[in-house]
Structure formats: C-alpha cells, structure tokens
Image: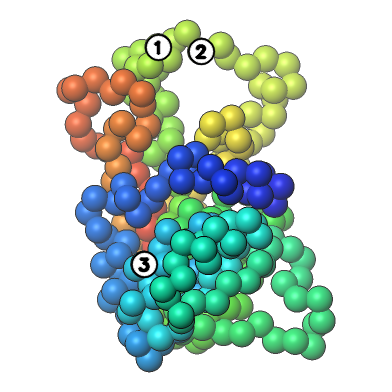
Amino acid sequence: MEKGYWEKIAPSYETEIFDVLKNDKSGKIVKAILSFASPKKSVIDIGCAVGKWMPVLAPVFGKVHAIDISNNNLKIAAKKYPQYTNITYERVDMSATTLLSAPSIKVKKYDSAICINAILTSSLKKRNLFFKHMASFIKKGGDLVLVVPSLESKLFSHIIANKYNIDEAKKDKAPTGKRAISQIRFIKDGVTDIDDVPTKHFLKEELELLLNLAGFTVEKIEKINYKWSTEFHKPPSWLKTPQPWDWMVKATKK
C-alpha cells in the first residue's frame, strides 16, 4: 500500500477502510490508551489516516501529533476536528529510508504513541523501516499501543469459509501461473489480500520478536475480536465463537 493508494482512497476512507474503533465492541484499545493518558503527556498517532482516534486522544492528552503518509487524509482529519486545538498534523512516510531530509535534525520524541492498523505494506524492507522509525518517536519508558491484522485470524477465516462454503467460497477460482507463485511467496511472509490489495498480517510470536528487536518491552498481546459480519457477507447464524480478530500490543520503549 503506497502513498498513491492512500491519497486516492482518502475521500472514501470512511466507507472503504475497516473502522477498528467502531468495531472494537470490547473497548480494549481505548482502555489501553486511557491507562497511560494524561494532560501532562504528549502522544503521537502514527498512521492517523482521517483522524478517527482524535476524539479519543485529544481530550485526555496535553498534546497530540498526528502523522500520516497521505496529505489528503491529513486535510480531512484537520477539517473534521477543528475543535481540538492541541492537535498538530504532519505528513510522514514511515517507510522512507530517512524520515527527515537533514540528518542533523533530530526526530521529536513523544511520551506515548498509538499505531492502529498502519503497518500494512507487503514490503519487508519498508516494514523494518516502519518499526525502526516508530521506536525513534517514543521516549525511553514511553507507552505504545499497536494494532495489526492477525495472520492466524485470516487463515482461520479461510478455513471456515472453505469448509462450510460461506459466501460460496468453493466457487472461488484458484490462482494459476505467475499470480499463484506470487501468492505463495507472499503467504510465506504473512502477506494476504484484503480487497485484492496485498496486506501484511502478523503472527503473535512474530510481533513479540519484532518489537523486542525494535527496542520495546512487550507487556501484553491481546485479541481484539470482531463480529463475523466483518469477515463474511452472509455469515451463518450458528457461527459464533471464536471470532475473527486483530492483535493489540501494549508495549514500552526500553
């Protein structure tokens, strides 16, 4: 998912992109954020998109810095929330080799950070840079709430769909040729399609390792469960639990 993709989809973001805040019926993410929120602290929303988390962050933090790869997303966010005067917006490409053009300029550090389903690129190199840069924004001892798509959940949903032919899954044609080879290579790296867009999904143990290597101490990893209607057009009435999920991580910077 490159910059051009997000710039193009920005006007229809509300309807096209899955709303984590709305669908987290348990409220676990908000609860995790509130556990370290304070008017005396600053927070950075990494990959803020159109600013869905601003109404959560702005009332409880002294300063909110919202960054995103898309200028269009940032313009929409700023227009939506003019009432919050403690928010600043900045376009940042977290997958760039360097975040700033001048190496002598230091990246500003924040007391805490959230990053909600923003590490999605299929490129391993860009993901590694994203984790590196994310760590650079957070002060030592600072808090991080990270949410990412779950690979276990995606595979589980595929198994359920194929076994019970949900949404007529058995009619789906298996890829052939170069597309099949590409998908095999992708799945080995945890990349699988969402609406025909190759999207990185993470294993629980993979997340713990990546965050440790990036300089974080992982405090907990939890499932954020969603209704089956978020996965299937026509989920059968008997399909209850386990539900599909994202991974939420609460971590601190070493």
Q: Which mark is residue 44?
A: none
Provide residue 244's location: percent of width, then percent of height: 33, 38
Near mark 2 (Cα within 10 A), the count class, few <14, some 14-19 or many ≥20, is few
**Label 2 vs label 1: CA separation?**
8 Å
Q: Dot 3: within a 10 Å radius of its alpha carbon, few (fewer than 14), some, or many (20 or more) residues?
A: few
Q: CA distance from mark 1 to mark 3?
A: 39 Å
Disc 3 versus disc 2: nearer the observer = 3
Task: Provide the residue designation for mark 3.
Answer: 55
From this view, report whether residue 7 is shown above or below residue 66. above
> In the drawing, what numbered circle is on residue 172?
2
| Residue type indicated by callout 3 | Pro
Q: Earlier in the sequence, mark 3 or mark 2?
A: 3
Mark 1 surroundings: few (<14), some (14-19) or many (≥20) residues within 10 A: few
Q: Are marks 2 and 1 in contact (CB under 8 Å)?
A: yes
Q: Residue at image x 69%, y 56%?
A: 126
Residue 139 coordinates in the image, percent (x, y): 51, 85
Disc 1 residue type (three-letter): Glu
Report the number of numbered marks: 3
Where, by quadrant of the figure, is residue 38 drawn?
A: bottom left
Foreground mark, 1 or 3?
3
x, y percent for residue 97: 77, 66
Task: Farthest residue to the bottom: give it.
Answer: 40
User: Of residues 226 and 132, which is closer to you in this image?
Assistant: 226
As drawn, is 72 to the left or to the right of 30?
right
Q: Which residue is mark 1?
A: 168
